[in-house]
Image: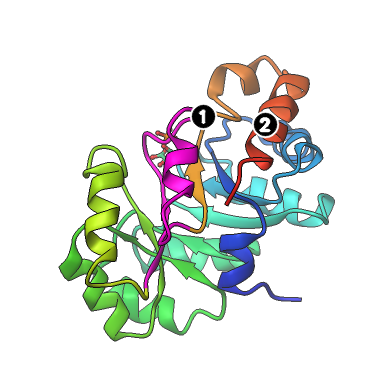
Amino acid sequence: MSVTIKEVMTTSPVMPVMVINHVEHAVPLANALVAGGLKVLEITLRTPVALECIRRIKAEVPNAIVGAGTIINTQTLDQALAAGAEFIVSPGITPSLLEASLSCGVPVLPGVVTPSEVMRLFEKGITAMKFFPAEAAGGIPMLKSIGGPLPQVTFCPTGGVNPKNAPEYLALSNVACVGGSWMAPADLVDAENWAEIARRAAEAAILKK
Ligand code: 3PG
């Protein structure tokens, strides 16, 4: 069953953003996050094994909703779709990626920062966007300001979001969920510390939206 963009945005308050270096970590990592209560997972295409990680999680962790991040062009979009990505996240948008995204058949979460970028996507019917890089691009005051003229658009801020500021982001009316890497940072994954990752996921999963 295919997922909707609403499910991607509202199933969990926090979307783990993962960089996986070893393919054998994919399934235990996803299991730890799902056990903690986070089901919507973004695997970034920043390592050579990322596509295989998506395939394995899709096959072996049925409770996860697995998406592909770091989609930067139509080539990476096609690769992610072929691997079975259930949704697509991009750090920004280009005209060709936008056209391909609109007809790709799975929900897309394109990255934006400015009102003009938001308007360009809104014009195409997109109302859910990633606000990236959230902290560097103005964070909470910027999102509040964008929400004035463009209240129809809902965001997933990512980049510099952490356990301390996540509740403040989630309190905004135009934020549906936040993304971040703090539940599964490289050191914990490399150490195969699935218990601590599950603990962090559980803490994130109970954040209020
Ligand atoms: C990224 O760029 O890797 C993601 O946006 C996650 O950012 P973070 O590591 O600041 O949470």
Task: Give the side of residue 186 with respect to residue 83, left or right.
Answer: left
Image location of residue 72, percent across then percent down: 34, 58
Q: Residue at x 28, y 43 (%)?
A: 139
- Where the N terminus falls, by quadrant? bottom right
**Image coloring type:** rainbow
Quadrant housing residue 121: bottom left
**Quadrant containing ligand 1:** top left
In the picture shown, does residue 3 fall above or below 112? below
Image location of residue 12, percent across then percent down: 65, 52
Decide whether residue 41 is among the magenta residues. Answer: no
Any mark on residue 203, and which?
2
Q: Residue at x 24, y 38 (%)?
A: 136
The magenta segment is 153-175
Of helix, strand and loop, which one carries label 1? loop
Looking at the rendered structure, the number of numbered marks drawn on it comes to 2
Mark 1 in CB contact with mark 2 (< 8 angstroms): yes
Reading the chain from its start, which is encountered first: label 1 or label 2? 1
Q: Amino acid at mark 2?
A: Glu
Q: Nearer the viewer, residue 139 or 82?
A: 139
Image location of residue 134, percent across then percent down: 32, 44
Q: Nearer the viewer, residue 148 or 8?
A: 148
Any mark on residue 163, and which?
1
